[in-house]
Image (cartoon, grey):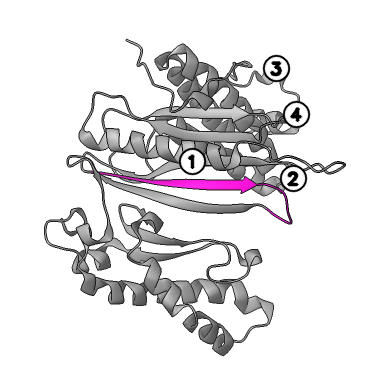
Amino acid sequence: MRCQVLALVAIFLAASTGGAAAIDCAKAKSGIEKAICADPAVKAADDAMAATYQDMLGRLDASAAAMLKDNQLQWLKLREDRCSGTAADALSRCLIAVSEERARYLSGMPQSGPGITPSPMPATLSRAESKTQCGAEVATYVFPQDGAPGLAVFNQAIDALSKNLEAEYGARMAEEEGFEYHCYYALDTHFTFTSPVLIAAANDISMYTGGAHGMYSSQSLIIDVAKGRTLVFGDVFPEAAQGPIAAMCSASLLEEKRARLGGMGMSDAEIVTEMAGYDETVGKAVPDFSRWMIYADRAEIYFGPYELGSYAEGPYTCTIPAAELAKLATSGSWIAE
């Protein structure tokens, strides 16, 4: 029985431009295709990804399958961009990594945790830029309707996020005469942890609307499956835990600052002083669960561009072991069990 997957919003209706099956090595043309065929391990990873893709097409309704075909073609271009030009000794590793990452997305498997039933289904949008609309690349999920309360909460949250992105970045602004610009937005959802108890997903967002560079961010969803509600900091930790968690986060960020800036002429004392200036930023971020990425063995707290340094430094995440968080968690919360 085919699983009927509802489109998130009307913008997800699109025409199919074709599929993308496993590579026929007798017809390999591009450098990437030839590299895949030359290494049995890389070919095996590509074949596994292609099989997962074909299986998912058979489980989706016609509308969702058409959109996934478009998205798969865009992913093939992305694979080319990510791995082309990679040194020969690293090319196989790059190709295996991107194939495994794609297979995980297509199957709805989390990066950690036992997974959840029913499995989430891909929900995609690939739209080319036009004179009236900005380009859009969306690779997110929707759960079947016949599941635990938390699955519906996830669907509602993704639907709202998708609509907000389209409303904010979907339409091209009027261009001044003689001036043209490119614009797009992208949403990439991946599950950092899922189980029958908890759904933890990271929604990576990027956009460009003209200017010197684009912007990007990440928003997390942490959902109690049985209760059907999005968790907040106070559901898991007492207020008194904010200070100790902030201290662990700052210590983790300091090590990351040292790794990035130590080779750029900054002394360790200068790096320590700079990081101390962000204590307030870290303290305010800790109780914001939309920044938390939950894994089986740790949590990571996300800081976007400019929050802890220059745009060129990129985003930062602090890493806190789950064992340390469990010591601070409220009795009965999922992390304390």
Circles 2 and 1: CB atoms closer than 8 Å? no
Task: Name which residue type carries label 1.
Answer: Asn
Say few, some or many: other residues with alpha carbon within 10 Å of mark 1 (under 14 / 14 to 19 / 20 or more): few
Q: Which amino acid type is shown beneath numbered disc 2? A: Gly
Q: Which residue is depicted at the point 56% across and 20% down? A: 69
Q: Do labels 4 and 1 touch, CB within 8 Å?
A: no
Mark 2–mark 4 CB contact (< 8 Å): no
| Dot in front, 3 or 2 | 2
Residue most extreme to the bottom: 269
Nearest to viewer (mark 4 / mark 3): 4
- Residue 24, given in percent of the width and then of the height, sits at 65, 18
Q: Give the left or right position of residue 300, taking residue 165 as reference.
A: left
Image coords of residue 32 (percent x, y): 70, 33
Circle 1 is placed at which residue position?
A: 164
Q: Measure the C-alpha gap from mark 4 to mark 1.
A: 38 Å
- Determine which residue is flagged by label 4: 30
Q: Is residue 336 above or below residue 78?
A: below
In the image, residue 155 above or below residue 217: above
Kindly report which numbered mark, 4 or 1, lies closer to the viewer in this rendering. Answer: 1
Majority secondary structure in the magenta region: strand
In the rendered image, which quarter is residue 327 located in? bottom left
Could you tell me which residue is drawn at 25 percent across and 41 percent down?
195
Residue at disc 1, secondary structure: helix
Tell me the crowding category of disc 4: few under 14, some 14 to 19, or many 20 or more residues within 10 angstroms, Cα based.
Answer: few
Q: Distance between the Cα atoms at labels 2 and 4? A: 13 Å
Relative placement, left or right, of 268 versus 107 is right
Q: Amino acid at mark 4?
A: Ser
Q: Secondary structure at mark 4?
A: loop
Return the mark for residue 26. Answer: 3
Q: Earlier in the sequence, mark 3 or mark 1?
A: 3
Give the residue pinned by disc 2.
85
In this rendering, the label closer to the viewer, 3 or 1: 1
